[in-house]
Every structure is written in C-alpha cells, then in structure tokens.
Image (cartoon, helix red, strand yellow):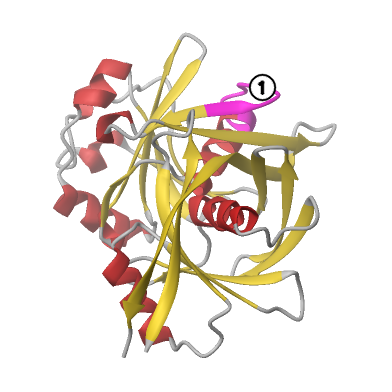
Amino acid sequence: MKVKVHVASAFSKDNKGGNKAGIVLFEQSLTTTQKKSIAKQLGYAETAFISKSERADYKFEYFTPKDEVALCGHATIGAFTALGYLKKLSKTQYTIETKSGILAINIEDDLTFMEQAKPIYYDVVTPEKFVECFNIEHLDNKYPIQIASTGLKDILIPIKKEENLNTLQPNFEKIKEISEYYDVVGMHLYTFKDDRIICRNFAPLYDIDEESATGTSNGALACHLYENLHLHKDTYIFEQGHSLKLPSEILVKLVTNNNDEVEKVYVGGRGYYCENKYLNVE
C-alpha cells in the first residue's frame, strides 16, 4: 500500500534550518510495524502519526527510525505547521492525546506552543561518568549535571563556552551506553554567551546522533534553569543546530506559582511546510 507523508520543519529561524519531521494524517489502519517502517524510510529524528481521538482533538503517536517515543516537541510543531498549510485548522487552541497525557496546543500568529508535563528531576550525575563521551575539561562545574524530564528524560550537561560546545567531539557509542544506563533519551548540552543560551543534543540510543532542534529537551532545560539555577526569564530562547548548519530557535514559556515552582510548561516555535511524498508500506 502507498501512504502519503507530509514533511515540515519545526523551530526554524527566518524560514530556514529547524528540524524536519514526517507527518502522517489520519491513516487509522496502520500497524505499529508499518509506522516503524515509515519512520525508518523517512529517516528523520521523529515522525508523527495523527489519528482521531475520543479524548482530545487529535491523537498523536511518535516514532523514531528505531522505536516509538512518548512525546516529541518538534514533530508536534511540524504537524500543526502542516495542518495549517493544508488549511485544516479552524481555531487557535487544540488538545492532543499523547502517551505523556492530554496536552494543550496554542497557536499565536505564526508561533505554535505545545504544553508539556510538569518537570520531574532525577539523578544529579558526576562529571567522571562522561570521561569517555567527550572532553570533560569542557564541563562547567559551576552547575550540576541534572537528569530531568517534561515528557522525555534527558541528561542536561553544562559546558563552559560556546567554542567548547561547537568543537566538542562526541563518542556516540559511549553516549549510547550512558543513555541506556540512566534510561534517558540522550544528552542535552548547553552553554551561555551573554544573553544567549546555545545547545546541542545527542540521542544515539534512538539512532539520532545529533538533532538540530529538540522541544522536550529545552522544555526540561528551561525548568532546570528556573527552579534549580534560579535563572528567571519571561521567555527562554534556545539556539540549536548551528553545528549541523540548521540554525534553530526554540521558545519556552513557564507558568509558575508563588513558591517559584513550575506549574505549566509551553514549548513553541515557527515552522514551514516542505513537501509531501508517497511511501510503499507492506
């Protein structure tokens, strides 16, 4: 059978860069095996499969080339970019059913914001654990290495300088081993330069060596910066993808209570429609 697949880029900057995702609309009869096959054929970090939901406006499922994951920020932003391009959107607020729960989507002009789960913090990891992953002399020891999640678990790793981050040479096999040991999707590295926050993301455990824009990782990072490092911003803007020549911009807004605890997390960005194609699926 032939399946129509749309492709859109999410978290783009000036209609360039971003992170491409596959989007399959309302193919209710696809099996899990067929979804995995489509994601593998496309080869993008994630592909979103959208179907009808009895609990929300849409049901979203996400597949990497290797396996299913519970949530994906850029594939969700890309999906709503595609739905808008195809003139299938009629309002500015939607809900989606995911394996991370029912989440809200807000559309503000050319921006799409996706609600994520409240942050959960796990282990703080010692720098020595990463000695074979990359040069640990580049780690910024002023800040903890924190495992956190707003839907997917990542290791948040501070790096001293932008130059260190850009020239860092990851050992993907070792990163895969550490990711499996701590049961995380991957590692999200970040650094500061003036008012900028620059990131790189490695998820080889899911066959994604490096990703140009990651919504869930930056959602978790914003919460970590706010609650644990006490860096408070109205809107966090994360830069990613420079090393892949795919400059990306991810926005995160937090809703907090009087105790400075995060109550809601919204990850957003801009996107553009790329193309559609047909794939053969057995």
Q: Which quadrant of the view contains residue 165? A: top left
Identify the image quadrant of the N terminus.
bottom left
User: Residue 180, position in %: x, y?
Assistant: 30, 61
Q: Which quadrant of the view contains residue 69? A: bottom left
User: Residue 58, position in %: x, y?
Assistant: 68, 70
Confirm whether the magenta stretch covers residue 227: yes
- Main SS of residues in magenta: loop
Indicate whether 245 appears above or below 101.
above
Q: Residue at x 57, y 50 (%)?
A: 77
Identify the image quadrant of the C terminus.
bottom left
Question: Which of the two residues, 142 or 53, is positioned nearer the viewer here?
Answer: 53
What amino acid type is highlighted by mark number 1? Lys
Q: Which quadrant of the view contains residue 98? A: bottom right
Confirm whether the magenta stretch covers residue 104: no
Helix, strand or loop at label 1? It is loop
Q: Which residue is mark 1?
A: 233
Q: Residue at x 23, y 49 (%)?
A: 175
Q: Residue at x 56, y 56 (%)?
A: 82
Indicate whether 259 appears above or below 57.
above
User: Residue 277, position in %: x, y?
Assistant: 37, 67
Q: How many marks?
A: 1
Q: Which residues are magenta?
A: 226-237
User: Residue 67, position in %: x, y?
Assistant: 36, 72
Indicate whether 55 appears above or below 229.
below
Q: Residue 54 vs residue 51: left or right?
A: right
Q: Residues within 10 Å of mark 1 (few under 14, many from 20)?
A: few
Q: Residue at x 33, y 38 (%)?
A: 126
In this view, the residue farthest toward the right is 258
Indicate whether 125 appears above or below 97.
above
Question: Which of the two residues, 78 or 204, is positioned nearer the viewer here?
Answer: 78
